[in-house]
Image: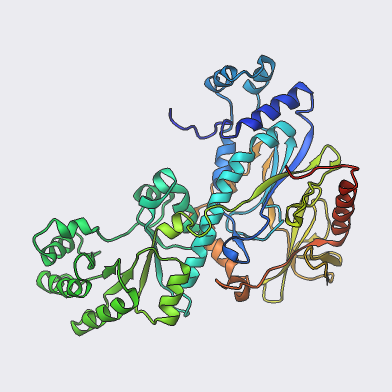
Amino acid sequence: MERKKGTPLFCDLYHLTMAQAMFDNNTHNRTETYEMFIRKTPFNGSYLLTAGLGEVLEWLNNWHFEPEDIEFLRQQGFKESFLDMLSTARLELDIDAFREGEVVFPNEPIVRVTGPAWQAVMIEAAVLNIINSQSLFATKASRIVQAASSDGKKRTVLELGLRRSQDMQGFSPTRAAYIGGIDITSNVAAGQHYNIPVGGTMAHCFIMREESEKEAFKNYIRSFPKQASVLIDTYDTLEGAKQAVLASKETGIPLKSVRLDSGDLAYLAKQVRKILDENDCHDTKITASNDLDEYTIQSLILEQNAPIDVFGVGTMLVTSFDQPALGGVYKLKRTGQRDVIKVSELPIKTTIPGATDVVRLLDAKGNYAGDVICTDNHSFVNGDSLAEPLTSIDIRSEKGRRFIRGKRAYRPMIPVMRNGLVNETEMKRDLSEIRNYAQANLNRLDETHKRLVSAHVYIASLEHSLFIKRRELRTNALQGKEKQYEN
């Protein structure tokens, strides 16, 4: 059966069983607030680059139960009265979120969902599935792109991961990688769907099927004279470089690039560069691939001085090889008029009570100067500055900071759904615009927070009264007055 865009069955079974239990107890329409957030940033870094919101909104925009959905649930034993309610249901949720391409930090509400309890529960899996994965890929891509320009020279990054992707057609990692800054993808279907530039070279089989390497190169560059990019490591890389030069001379077609896909990339790139320059192929670029990640790329540039112009990244990006899961969570923050807290023996897993919002402070240059998590109904920001002084406390160190009235600030969360109607502007944002927005936001983050190793921690602290409230509710819960322990 074809996967449907807006199916509410994009959920775990327990979302439906909880919804029926709420319905049976006539609490399903109680207004509740849930928030998605991360407890720690990925890759031992200091930030998360958000991605996936547009696709969440597209799913929500098409959300409805089809007759076959109701019949399937009937076969699973759900009650007829509950199924009758589902069959005519429409979303009534209010959702606020960080825009795609924003930078976020631990405990900040990436998505805040308010509305009928059963609906807020039902969308959890989709929100986490889409935003967790795409934010992870986008963040990984941003680190790779940063590494590729670690000496200040902009280099092209090509995404080559379709054959290693664990997502059918590789749409999600390719979309997110483009937001994170990659320039080109080899994934044709994703390129067409998202309007991402496509590119690539050739496979080893094209060389192996011909009698000689040179003839294979000549055949290929005759077919694609404007691209004229060949893979030279099928047999012997340095001999392959010489044969590529001969193929170019005999056809009269300038080589655009040669690609290295194995071996000691730094050594081979230097030798190939020498061969190219000796044959007046000064404009021919060298592309390198072979399980590259941000650490290898940075080493090739800064430590090994490899004359590589283009980096092709695949497996390490589209599988997020060193951290395959983000771990974003979706937790209840308010039920009816009561703010709730989930307590854990692990301090990192104790939540912040109540619906929350974020105030982002800026320095005189417009760069990020600190985030403060506040209640959702705060009045600290007026326009683009603080309307009143703001005191915050770091959860970890319990150290305080005070920001004066008039300091530059803004609220990065925006409305993306009201009473079940999506913000179409956010849903339909052009991917190139999101990509540029992401780069602009990353540029506002101090370089120390973007280090690949030992990144300086960016502080997202709690507004003072919220810090006190969290501490009191945690104490009450631990004393047995209102226990909500980790499962």
Q: Position of residue 208 (x, y in %)?
A: 16, 58
| Residue at x 79%, y 23% (from the top left corner) | 25
Answer with left or right where residue 469 lies relative to residue 30.
right
Q: Position of residue 256 (x, y in %)?
A: 25, 70
Q: Vertically, is 275 above or below 316?
A: below
The residue closer to the viewer here, 142 or 256, is: 142
| Residue at x 27%, y 61% (from the top left corner) | 201
How many numbered marks appear? 0
| Quadrant of residue 183 within the rendered picture | bottom left
Q: Position of residue 317 (x, y in %)?
A: 45, 59
Q: Position of residue 387 (x, y in %)?
A: 84, 64
Q: Dividing the image into 4 quarters, which one contains the C terminus?
A: top right
Q: Vertically, is 40 above or below 1?
A: below
Whether residue 98 appears in this view of the structure is yes
Answer with left or right where residue 129 lies relative to residue 344.
left
Q: Dividing the image into 4 quarters, which one contains the N terminus?
A: top left
Name of the residue lying farthest toward the front: 345
The residue closer to the viewer here, 122 or 321, is: 321
Whether residue 148 appears in this view of the structure is no
| Quadrant of residue 243 within the rendered picture | bottom left
Answer with left or right where residue 418 lies relative to residue 201.
right
Q: Vertically, is 484 above or below 378?
A: above
Answer with left or right where residue 248 lies relative to residue 444.
left
| Residue at x 47%, y 49% (from the top left corner) | 172
Name of the residue lying farthest toward the top: 80
What colour scheme governs how the chains and residues are painted in the rendered image of this protein? rainbow
